[in-house]
Amino acid sequence: MHKQAILLGSDAIAHGVRLSRPEVISAYPITPQTHIIETLSEMVDSGELKSQYIKVESEMSAIAAVLGSVSTGSRSFTASSSQGLAMMHEILHWVAGARLPLVLVNANRALGAPWNIWSDQSDSFSQRDTGWLQIYCETSQEALDTIIIAYKASEQLMLPIMVMIDGFILSHTMERLLVPDQQIVDDYLPAYKAPYRLDPDNSLTFGAAAHPDLFYELKKTFSETMTEALTVLDQCQEEFAQKFGRCYQPVMRCPEGDEKSNTALLCCGAMTGTVRVAVAELNKNGTPTDLIKLRLLRPFPNRELCEALKDKKQVIVLNRACSYGVGGTLSQEVRAALYNLPQRPLINDVMISLGGKEVFPETITEVVENREQLSSVECNWLDS
Amino acid sequence: MNNTNISPTENSFSKNTAWQITKAEYMESGHMACPGCGAALSMRHTLKILGPQTIVVMPACCWAIIAGGQPTTALSVPLLHTPFAVAAAAASGVRRSLTAQGKTGVEVLAWAGDGGTFDIGLQGISGAAERHEDIIYICYDNEAYMNTGIQQSSATPHGAWTTTTPGGKEFQYAKKDIMAIIKAHNPSYLASATIAYPEDFYLKLKKAKAASGFRFIHLLAACPSGWKIDSQDALKITRMAVDSGVFPLLEMDDNGLLRQTLKPENSIPVKDYLKAQGRFKKMPDLEIEAWQKEIG
C-alpha cells in the first residue's frame, strides 16, 4: 500500500507528482523550488516517470507551456516560487479563466527588493485573485498527499490548484513519511479525460473575446464553481482519507490546542509545526490556547472558520505576508470571514515573520502571554 | 540578406502552382479583418496548405480580433488564444501534449504579429527554437502594433509614421533583423514570404510542412490603415516591397545561408515603394537615398 521513506520535502513532492502521472511537465529553476524539478528530471531520465519534460527559458513560458498542454488534454505539472510566480501572474489569470485543470507547486519565498530567498508567503498571497484554488501545507507528507488530492479536485472542477510549501522549511528538510504505491493512487486518481481539448477532429476555439454581458456571465459561473469547490475538495479529501488513512480539511483544529479556551492562534503552512510546540507549552503552563490551522486560502472557507472560532474572545492571526498599508494579508481574510458572526472575537494582526525571519516557539508563547498588549486595530510588528 | 543569388531549387516552381491550391477553406467568411488586410489573406492560404489537421496558437495580435469573438470563430481548425508573450511556449506545450498522447500527423502553428514576435514574444520564440520544438512559427509582419492603433514596434521600418513616431523622424533605428536572429538558432526551416507572391509563398509553406522541428516563416502583410494606402492597393504595394528589395524573399539553404528565392522581374527604386504609402510621406529624400544605397 505504501513505503516508508525519509525524504527531502522537494523529493516528497516529486513523488506526489510522479504518482499523479502527468503527461507534460514544464520546468524552470528558482530557489528554493529547484530540487522539485531536478528530481522530476531524474525520474523522467530513469524512465520511472513517463512525461514530456519541457525545459523552458522563463517562468512565463513554464506556465504558458502547460497552458498549451492542458488545453490539448494532458494532465500537466509545473512548479515555481517567488519572483517566478510573480512572473507567471498574467498567465495564472488566463489558465483559471480558461477553466484548465492544473496543479502547480509553489515553494513560498519572499519577493524582492531587496533580494531574499527565504520563506515568506507574499508570493502566493499576491496571487489570491487569479482564480486558482490555494492550499497551504504544513508537512511534506501533507504536500505529497495534497498534490494527488489536488489533481482529482482540479479535474472535477476544471479549475487550477496551487499547492504551497514553505521554501527551505519544507523543501530542504528531511521528513519521515509514507509514499503510497502507484496502484492505490491509480485507483483514487484515474487518468484525465478532458471534456474539451484542442483536437483537429473536433475543432474548437479557446479563449476568444467575450463581450461584456457574456464575460460577466462566465465570471459569475466561475465564481459559483469556486464556491462549489469547497464541497468538491471536501469529497476528494474524504475519499483520500478512506483510501489512504490521512485526513485533511480546509480548517483544522490542532490537538495541541485547548478547544475550550477563549484565545486561539491561527496560522497556515509549515509554521504550524512550531506553533503546535508553543501551544502545547502554553496549555501546560496554564495559558489555555487553541490552535487553528488554515489549509485553504481560496476559496476561503468562511463557514468552517466561523464555526471553528465562533466562541472565541480573541483570535491572534500569525502572518507571513503583508499587504502594505493594511497589515497581514491573512488577517484581512480572517476579519472579513468573521465579520458576520453575531459575537465577533477580537482579532489581532501579528506579523510573525517575513523573508525567513525565524519563528521560535518562544516567539509565539511571548505573543500569547502578552496578548493584552496587542493592538486590535494596527498590525502588530515584533520588536527587533 | 543582400545575397542576390537565386536558389536553383526554388526558381523552378511550376506555372501551375496556383491551380494546385485546394478549394477547401479552413478560414471562413464573416471574419473581422479590415478590407485589404494582408494578414487575413495570409492565414487563408496558410491553412489551405497546412490543411485541416492543424492546431493554431495565437497571442494578442490583429488576428485575435479577426478570428472573431465568442460564440463565433473564423477558423474551422482548432484555435488557442493566448496572452501576448507566450505563443511559442504555449505551442510547445500543445506539441508535447500531442506527443505524449502518441498523436502524429498534426501541425502546430504559432501565428503571431510583429509585436508578439519581434518584441514581447521574442524570448519565448528563442526558447522554442533552441529546444527545436516541432512547430511552425509564422510571424505576419505588418510593421507596427496595428491592432492597438498603429504604434511603432521593432519591426517598424526606419522613417515610417506611426502614432508613436508621429513625425517619422523620432524613430531612427533600423528594423530588427528577425531572420538573422532566428537563423542563429539553427532552425529546421527559415524563410521570408508574402502572399503578394503566392507561388513563392505556397512552395515555402509546403516545404515548412514537409519538414519537422522548429520552422519559422516571416511574412510581410500589408495593413492598409497603418501603411496609409488604399485597400485595393494592398497586394500591389506589398509586391513593390519585394520588387524594390526592401523585403527580399529568402530561404535558408542546406548550408545555413539565406538565399533569395525570387528575383523580381521588374526591379523598382525604393523611392517608388515608399512614395506609394502615406506612412513614409515625411521621410526626407536623403534618407530614402541612403536606404537605396544600402539595398544596392
Image (cartoon, rainbow, N blue to C red):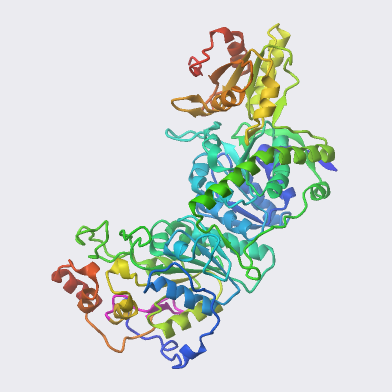
**Front residue of this view, candidates A101 and A204:** A204
The answer to whether any part of residue A359 appears in the image is no
Where residue A362 appears, as percent x and y from the top left, is: 61, 14
Q: Is residue A184 above or below residue B203?
A: above
| Left or right, A55 with reference to A1 | left
Q: Quadrant of residue A370?
A: top right
Where residue B170 appears, as percent x and y from the top left, is: 21, 57
The quarter of the image holding the C terminus of chain B is bottom left
| Left or right, B123 with reference to B100 | left
- At 54% from the left edge and 31% from the top edge, which residue is drawn? A120
Total numbered labels: 0
Q: Which residues are magenta?
A: B244-259
Q: Quadrant of residue A236?
A: top right
Q: Is residue A281 above or below residue A163?
A: above
The answer to whether any part of residue B118 appears in the image is yes
- Seen as rendered, the residue at the extreme top is A286
- Seen as rendered, the residue at the extreme front is A213
- At 70% from the left edge and 50% from the top edge, which residue is drawn? A155
Overall secondary structure of the magenta stretch?
loop
Where residue A378 appears, as percent x and y from the top left, is: 48, 17
Where residue A99 appears, as percent x and y from the top left, is: 61, 51
The quarter of the image holding the N terminus of chain B is bottom left
| Left or right, B178 with reference to A210 | left
Residue A229 sits inside the magenta stretch = no
- Seen as rendered, the residue at the extreme bottom is B15
Q: Is residue A274 above or below residue B51?
A: above
Residue B258 sits inside the magenta stretch = yes
